[in-house]
Image: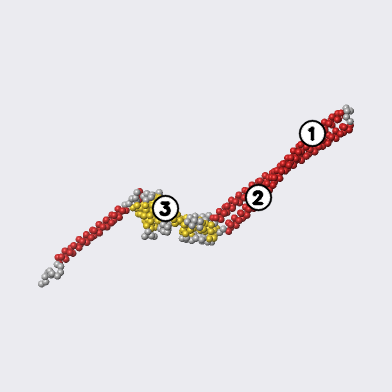
Amino acid sequence: MKPLLSPDRPSLGLRLRAMSRLPRLRGQAMIGAALVAVLVVGGWSYGRLDHITESDARVMADMVTISSRIDGWIAQRPVTDGQKIKAGDVLAVIDQREAAQQLEELKARADSIRLDRERAEAQMRIVTGTTTSAVTAAEARRTAAIADLAAAHSEAERAAEDFHRTDALLAAQYASRQTWDLHRSQLRRAEEAQRAAQARLGEAEAALAEARAHLGDVGVLQKETERLAHDAEQIEAQRRQHEISMGDRVVRSPVDGIVDQKFVEPGEYVIPGQRLLLLHDPKTVWVEANIKETKLERLRPGQSVSIAVDAYPDRSFTGTIERIGNTTTSQFALLPSPNPSGNFTKITQRVPLRIAVTQPDDFPLRPGMMVEIDIDVGQR
């Protein structure tokens, strides 16, 4: 019969005691792991008390839609999607041939009106000079005629007195018939001279009236000059308008940026207001997040924000809260959700949050990129 215990192997009791200790060790290990997990989760949760995180965020930018102010055929479109451009670069050219021809016609009409105006002004100066001289000469002749008439009238009065006196003397037999005939001849000559002086005065007055009438020619030429000046202003206004139209046919970029999308090709016909291209300034971007309304109480403009960009997991970005929206996103929904039936389910709303971020020199942040934000609300 073999002995129950042999010196070369452990006893059955020892093995049984070792096996009984295994559950206790396993339980102690599980308790330790649970304590470690509780400590880790507790520490992480404690740290989250001063932080607000949100994954519903994306990079935004002002998208500039380039439209046409006039209609016409696209002659050139020298840019394409993704191309970097500078302010003033040509984005598209609309056919300019007809507008250029109209502008040339307006310039020719402006030159013709300018020549007509110069000719009218020169003629007005000539007519003004000659008419003024004619009026002055006619006034001088009229003055001389008045003086001659006055002298002839005085001579006629003297001759009439001499004749009447001689006639009385002849009746009293104190004067000879020859003297009477002489005085009567002198009276007739004086009367003829008076009538001639009167006629010359009439001619002088008529000439003066005619000279003064020609002063109206100056007024007519003045009106013609004014009309031509008005026509020149109208042509100039039309020319400026056509120059603006010519400028509008060359569509230029208003900002430095990147072409995001083109909507037309050379040869297409466009109308006013039609979109030609879409672009944005890569230097001016921000992050927009939709934060739950229950978290707004701890948010303030100027708080620091850590930004994790999905496209660059190894890079970190920082920003600051720039503006907190005053309206929830549901207010801008295309289909509002009224509650006429009285059924109601309370849903936490979200408020847009704008975060200012500095774009690095290599412009990694592009509009539409998804990001995650971490806001430190414990800072003061």
Residue tagged 3: 333
Q: How crowded is mark 1: few (under 14 residues within 10 Å), some or many (20 or more)?
A: some
Q: Residue at x 79, y 38 (%)?
A: 197
Q: Please name whichever residue, 104 or 271, is drawn nearer the observer in this view of the structure.
A: 104
In the displayed structure, does residue 10 sit left or right of residue 70?
Answer: left
Image quarter for residue 40?
bottom left
| Amino acid under disc 2 | Glu
Q: How far apart are marks 1 and 3 (CA)?
A: 111 Å
Q: Which residue is drawn at 11% across and 71% down?
A: 2
In the displayed structure, does residue 207 sit left or right of residue 235?
Answer: right
| Amino acid under disc 1 | Ser
Q: N-terminal of the two: label 2 or label 3? A: 2
Image x and y of residue 42, in percent: 28, 54
* Element assignment for label 2: helix
Q: Residues within 10 Å of mark 3 (few under 14, many from 20)?
A: few
- Mark whose residue sits in front, 1 or 3: 1
Say if 192 sits above or below 324 in the image: above
Q: Are marks 2 and 3 in contact (CB under 8 Å)?
A: no
Q: N-terminal of the two: label 1 or label 3? A: 1
Residue tagged 1: 154
Q: Please name whichever residue, 19 or 119, is drawn nearer the observer in this view of the structure.
A: 119
Residue tagged 2: 118
